[in-house]
Image (cartoon, rainbow, N blue to C red):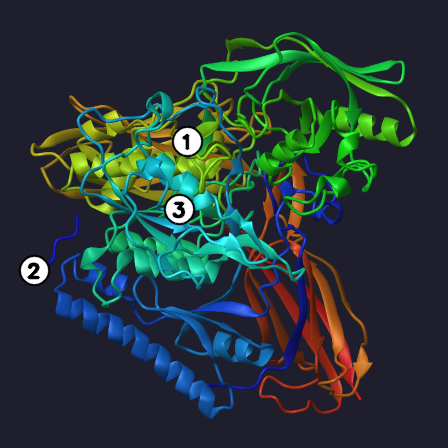
């Protein structure tokens, strides 16, 4: 624990950047293999968000976190205020210099603590100038982030609780900053453990759960749910959160904001999340971070954006240096890989503790479901009961279903009237029948609406786990999950006029066959720098927690939540327990111990679980800590390939420790990967740290298509082994990260109004070893050259590029802004991959008339 007494004018206009990786979420269904057809199909629906031209500019000048780290973690209040002011002053110098050149920057957020930079809407001219500025480290796109969970309802006794504790400790004295939507502080389950908050989104000075501006009956839910998992207590049947004695500082970085359709959706922007981390390390805003929260839970995810240098990932590193551990979800987009998968941002950052979701339920409920379309039986098998209220005897019903949209299209916005959702006959057509409902992003609302309309049962399609949608008095009917294919056949039958019926048998409870396994919706795959992510997993299926507002009976409402945000909340609570038990640990040590003492899940790949399931008891007893918590080895070229890593081993105990390093291989073909640690045995004095170089070589042929993987075990006599997971993938790096590169006109006059359009596809969605993987770019550069091969300058640069179709306007001006003279010129486009490997290069020739 830290203790302390400009350049030329732009020539390219960026016309559009349409990412192929759509902003869509929820539990991921299998994506088509074609990148183009993948648009909008990855996962469930997320709102379309218009981010405009917002960018985050990161400066090279040090932030407060950088200064404190250089000072060895020791700083006075006066020094910290001075360093914060110096970071802000460096921004003022840059902005003033740009103003002299006619570029006016209107900042939306200023950052000085966790990183040095600002966010602003930038036109292409400003963007190019900033990229060429010597004091700018990089300009990054602002992305949308969404709550990483699926909500449900609760009948007392039907939900599940995270079975996680550290006897004798409840997190008392520890503050957890919750970066999420607003929180309903009046919920009795939260017992006054919620401090007055900070609102980054705006309009709510105490960071309360806000109602939808055009529908006051709908209130932000996610923050209240996460708060219940963190500190809730005194609930029905002994329901409680993980760290009942801790305090939560709500920082509202997500909430109702206008989306691309002009309506209102719940989301956050990455520039708002960075601003939230600034507040987490300096809650009173006095430029001194001695009052930083011990733990920060960012319960949101940027879909597929597992970049190591994402601004939020960089900010998590700054928070760690200021002694705040940042815990983030891996995302809910399912399995991917073997190289890069579907881990969300900021989970790709080295400093963030990234958490996947495991299914730890002991029992599940199921029933036989028979669906008939006409005379044909299309389903006859045991299916999960996702609602807790079950029929006392077998139930046979006709089915009512939507007929307003083709199968596969999403229904209208959450809470849409059933008169629109079901057959045009109105709500009376649903009474006494089974209603077919798409789980979508709001199963709670859809099921409750169906029950109020008189439905006798609900068939849900969308992949909800068994028991994940307990129901209270607002929906006292059975709810069962059916396959997507069956839902499609029901809809086709209804539209053709066929009779459709369903029978739901008695509900039975049985041992959960998926117990101890990673949930199928939990995002997997390496981060873009080849790092193993997530580092660990935690319970994240059908967890019961608080909901905002009151139930129809006037009692406090409870709900079930599924997702990696719920799992991250469990780990953040565990971090509070560990921080109370061992107050001398700094944030880096908290992170290491939680990850490296996790219990491996049998039969589960390292790239899915990291080190395993969180175990705060084991973490509380560990005497060593190792950094990093997961190795970033990446792709090997084949036999003879060599890579290098470094372990930092720290003695946290009060005794000298003999330490031994051993390599564990846990996959087929992993033996072909050899490690050598120098030294592999050494004695580490108390309180001391030692760097251990690791040499990684490929000595044999690859076996199969899966990665070689395992763990580096760091052992001390009398202590448990610490596990640092590693994975190596194989094969030559891709050289096809640019495609369909073309100019709309190859001969034109200089014109700002009618530029020639440069169109290209950058990055790839590849299909390998049975999974899709996102192959993104670290950088996309467009430079201008003359016919003699002389480089005239940089026209445009994009960083952290997700696969997509991009378009640029070539105005016919030089990098200095002057019209180009007549003659022949060349555009050179360079796509730099996120991992080590050759860049993909393309060139186009054009003539200025």
Q: Gap between marks 2 and 3, in whole Å?
A: 37 Å
* Left or right, 92 with reference to 455: left
Residue 537 visible in the displayed image: yes
Near mark 2 (Cα within 10 A), the count class, few <14, some 14-19 or many ≥20, is few
Q: Quadrant of residue 819?
A: bottom right
Which residue is at a point 58% across and 64% down the rendered structure image?
A: 51
Near mark 3 (Cα within 10 A), the count class, few <14, some 14-19 or many ≥20, is many
Foreground residue among 565 and 61: 565
Quick check: 264 above or below 12? above
Q: Gap between marks 1 and 2, in whole Å?
A: 38 Å
Residue with the mark numbered 2: 5
Give me the disc on residue 537.
Answer: 1
Near mark 1 (Cα within 10 A), the count class, few <14, some 14-19 or many ≥20, is many
- Rendered-image quadrant of the C terminus: bottom right
* Left or right, 235 with reference to 366: left
**Which circle's residue, 1 or 2, is located before the other in the chain?**
2
């Amino acid at each position: 624990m830290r203790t302390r007494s400009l350049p030329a004018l732009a020539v390219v206009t960026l016309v559009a950047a349409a990412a192929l990786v759509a902003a869509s979420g929820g539990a991921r269904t299998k994506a088509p293999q074609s990148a183009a057809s993948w648009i909008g199909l990855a996962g469930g629906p997320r709102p379309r968000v218009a981010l405009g031209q917002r960018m985050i500019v990161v400066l090279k000048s040090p932030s407060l976190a950088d200064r404190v780290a250089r000072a060895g973690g020791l700083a006075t209040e006066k020094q910290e205020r001075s360093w914060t002011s110096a970071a802000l002053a460096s921004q003022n110098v840059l902005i003033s210099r740009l103003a002299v050149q006619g570029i006016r920057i209107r900042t939306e957020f200023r950052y000085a603590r966790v990183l040095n930079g600002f966010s602003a809407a930038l036109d292409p001219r400003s963007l190019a100038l900033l990229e060429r500025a010597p004091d700018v480290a990089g300009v990054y796109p602002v992305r949308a982030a969404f709550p990483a969970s699926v909500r449900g309802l609760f009948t007392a006794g039907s939900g599940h609780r995270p079975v996680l504790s550290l006897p004798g400790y409840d997190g008392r004295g520890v503050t957890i900053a919750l970066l999420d939507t607003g929180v309903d502080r009046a919920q009795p389950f939260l017992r006054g453990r919620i401090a007055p908050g900070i609102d980054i989104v705006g309009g709510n000075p105490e960071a309360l759960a806000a109602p939808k501006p055009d529908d006051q009956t709908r209130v932000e839910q996610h923050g209240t749910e996460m708060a219940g998992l963190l500190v809730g207590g005194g609930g029905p049947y002994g329901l409680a959160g993980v760290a009942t004695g801790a305090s939560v500082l709500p920082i509202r970085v997500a909430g109702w904001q206008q989306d691309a359709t002009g309506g209102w959706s719940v989301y956050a922007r990455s520039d708002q999340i960075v601003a939230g981390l600034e507040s987490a390390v300096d809650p009173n805003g006095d430029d001194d971070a001695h009052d930083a929260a011990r733990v920060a839970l960012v319960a949101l995810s940027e879909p597929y954006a597992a970049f190591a240098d994402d601004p939020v990932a960089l900010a998590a590193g700054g928070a760690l240096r200021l002694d705040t551990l940042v815990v983030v979800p891996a995302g809910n987009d399912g399995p991917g890989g073997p190289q890069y998968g579907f881990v969300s941002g900021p989970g790709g950052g080295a400093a963030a503790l990234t958490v996947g979701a495991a299914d730890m339920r002991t029992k599940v409920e199921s029933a036989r479901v028979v669906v008939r379309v006409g005379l044909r039986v299309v389903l006859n098998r045991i299916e999960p009961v996702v609602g807790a209220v079950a029929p006392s005897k077998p139930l046979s019903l006709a089915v009512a279903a939507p007929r307003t949209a083709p199968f596969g299209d999403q229904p209208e916005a959450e809470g849409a009237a059933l008169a629109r959702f079901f057959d045009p006959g109105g709500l009376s057509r649903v009474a006494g029948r089974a209603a077919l409902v798409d789980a979508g992003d709001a199963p709670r609302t859809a099921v409750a609406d169906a029950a109020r309309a008189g439905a006798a049962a609900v068939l849900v399609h969308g992949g909800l786990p068994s028991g994940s949608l307990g129901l209270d008095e607002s929906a006292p009917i059975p709810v069962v999950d059916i396959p997507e294919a069956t839902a499609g056949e029901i809809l086709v039958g209804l539209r053709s006029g066929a009779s459709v019926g369903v029978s739901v048998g008695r509900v039975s409870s049985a041992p959960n066959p998926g117990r101890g396994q990673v949930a199928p919706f939990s995002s997997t795959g390496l981060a873009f720098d080849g790092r193993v992510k997530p580092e660990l997993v935690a319970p994240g299926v059908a967890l019961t927690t608080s909901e905002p507002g009151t139930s129809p009976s006037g009692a406090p409402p409870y709900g079930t939540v599924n997702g990696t945000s719920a799992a991250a909340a469990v780990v953040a609570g565990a971090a509070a327990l560990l921080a109370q038990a061992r107050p001398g640990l700094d944030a880096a040590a908290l992170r290491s111990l939680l990850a490296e003492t996790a219990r491996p899940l049998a039969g589960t790949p390292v790239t899915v679980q990291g080190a395993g399931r969180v175990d705060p008891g084991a973490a509380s007893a560990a005497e060593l800590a190792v950094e990093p918590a997961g190795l970033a080895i990446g792709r090997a070229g084949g036999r003879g390939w060599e890579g290098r890593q470094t372990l930092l081993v720290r003695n946290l105990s009060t005794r000298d420790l003999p330490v031994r390093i051993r390599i564990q291989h846990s996959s087929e073909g992993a033996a072909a990967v050899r490690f050598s640690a120098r030294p592999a045995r050494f004695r580490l004095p108390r309180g001391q740290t030692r760097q251990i170089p690791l040499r990684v070589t490929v000595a044999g042929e690859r076996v199969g298509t899966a990665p070689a993987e395992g763990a580096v075990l760091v052992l001390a006599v009398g202590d448990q082994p610490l596990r640092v997971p590693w994975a190596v993938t194989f094969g030559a790096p891709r050289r096809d990260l640019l495609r369909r590169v073309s100019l709309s006109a190859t001969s034109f006059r200089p014109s700002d109004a009618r530029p020639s359009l440069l169109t290209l596809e950058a990055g790839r969605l590849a299909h390998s070893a049975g999974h899709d993987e996102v192959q993104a770019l670290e950088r996309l550069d467009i430079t201008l050259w003359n016919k003699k091969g002389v480089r005239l300058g940089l026209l445009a640069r994009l960083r952290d590029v997700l696969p997509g179709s991009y378009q640029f306007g070539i105005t016919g001006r030089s990098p200095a802004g002057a019209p180009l003279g007549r003659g022949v010129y060349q555009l050179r486009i360079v796509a730099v991959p996120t991992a080590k490997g050759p860049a993909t290069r393309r060139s186009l020739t054009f003539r200025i008339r």
